[in-house]
């Protein structure tokens, strides 16, 4: 039986069972430990599971995907090696639905699709021509949701999962994400970057059931309220 559980800050636990741990990562928290030694989701998740179940010794927790440090939102971690393998396959085969919300500079209207070829060099990603060495296809679908003060709230469905994909694809069209100085933003954003992983929908790794977890961003008005309403209204079959 899946159950919800509370956790100490900064982790907000949304789902916990024998194979899964789904949390909301706050902006600024690392997904995985790095050379800075700053707190990270994986280490905090292990500590949470160890305390929750009073486990002796080391705790297994598998990292099957990442969010950039300035990005907030849902992350799923695997509590068993079987879950880690099967979840990784869903990410690799693109059968897992990933939905984001973002606030971008300028005005966008309607809905559309962005298709590009991306190359990562050092810590920066850029759009290149098809067939360029190392280029990888990137595709997303977006929907403009609200406008205010020269900014647009967009809902985004990722069809691929490239590094910095959302940030680069919008910036390349003259709509950098608010707060994203690396890719040309002129506007700041509380917490750093206006991008949030709002929904993960996937097949449970060990049971014949679907998992659909949603989380609204902790953003200032009117963006947080508008994003929350859109996320809540997404149909369960939406991908």
Image (tube, rainbow, N blue to C red):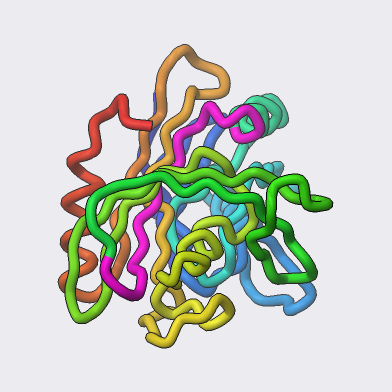
Q: How many marks?
A: 0
Looking at the picture, tell me which residue is in the foreground, 234 or 171. Answer: 171
Where does residue 17 sit, x and y in percent of width and height? 48, 32
Q: Is residue 117 above or below residue 96?
A: below
**Residue 61 visible at all:** no
Looking at the picture, tell me which residue is in the foreground, 13 or 99. Answer: 99
**Residue 134 visible at all:** yes
Where does residue 136 sit, x and y in percent of width and height? 70, 46
Q: Is residue 1 above or below residue 148?
A: above
Looking at the picture, tell me which residue is in the foreground, 170 or 219. Answer: 170
Q: Quadrant of residue 35?
A: bottom right
Tell me the quarter of the image containing the C terminus.
top left
Looking at the picture, tell me which residue is in the foreground, 70 or 122. Answer: 122
Q: Is residue 185 above or below residue 217?
A: below
What's the residue at 53%, 35% (across, down)?
Answer: 20
**Which residue ends up furthest to the top in the rendered image?**
208
Q: Is residue 3 above or below residue 114?
A: above
Give the residues in magenta. 91-107
Question: Quick check: 134 left or right of 156?
Answer: right
Tell me the quarter of the image containing the N terminus.
top left
Whether residue 106 appears in magenta in the rendering, the answer is yes
Question: Quick check: 132 left or right of 55?
Answer: right
Where does residue 234 sit, x and y in percent of width and height? 24, 38
What's the residue at 66%, 65% (across, down)?
Answer: 126
Whether residue 157 appears in magenta in the rendering, the answer is no
What's the residue at 32%, 62% (across, down)?
Answer: 217
What's the residue at 41%, 29% (across, down)?
Answer: 211
């Amino acid at each position: 039986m899946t159950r919800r559980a509370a956790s100490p800050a900064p982790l907000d636990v949304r789902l916990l069972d024998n194979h899964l741990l789904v949390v909301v990562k706050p902006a600024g928290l690392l997904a995985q430990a790095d050379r800075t030694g700053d707190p990270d989701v994986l280490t905090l998740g292990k500590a949470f599971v160890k305390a929750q179940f009073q486990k002796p010794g080391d705790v297994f927790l598998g990292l099957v995907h990442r969010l950039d440090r300035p990005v907030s939102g849902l992350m799923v971690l695997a509590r068993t090696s079987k879950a880690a393998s099967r979840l990784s396959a869903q990410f690799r085969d693109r059968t897992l639905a990933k939905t984001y919300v973002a606030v971008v500079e300028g005005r966008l209207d309607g809905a559309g699709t962005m298709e590009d070829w991306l190359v990562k060099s050092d810590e920066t990603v850029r759009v290149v021509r098809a067939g360029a060495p190392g280029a990888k296809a990137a595709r997303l679908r977006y929907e403009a949701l609200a406008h205010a003060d020269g900014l647009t709230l967009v809902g985004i469905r990722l069809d691929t999962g490239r590094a910095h994909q959302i940030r680069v694809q919008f910036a390349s069209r003259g709509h950098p994400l608010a707060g994203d100085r690396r890719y040309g933003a002129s506007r700041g954003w509380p917490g750093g970057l206006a991008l949030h992983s709002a929904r993960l929908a996937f097949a449970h790794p060990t049971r014949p059931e679907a998992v659909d977890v949603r989380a609204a961003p902790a953003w200032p008005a009117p963006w947080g309220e508008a994003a929350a309403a859109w996320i809540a209204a997404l149909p369960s079959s939406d991908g």
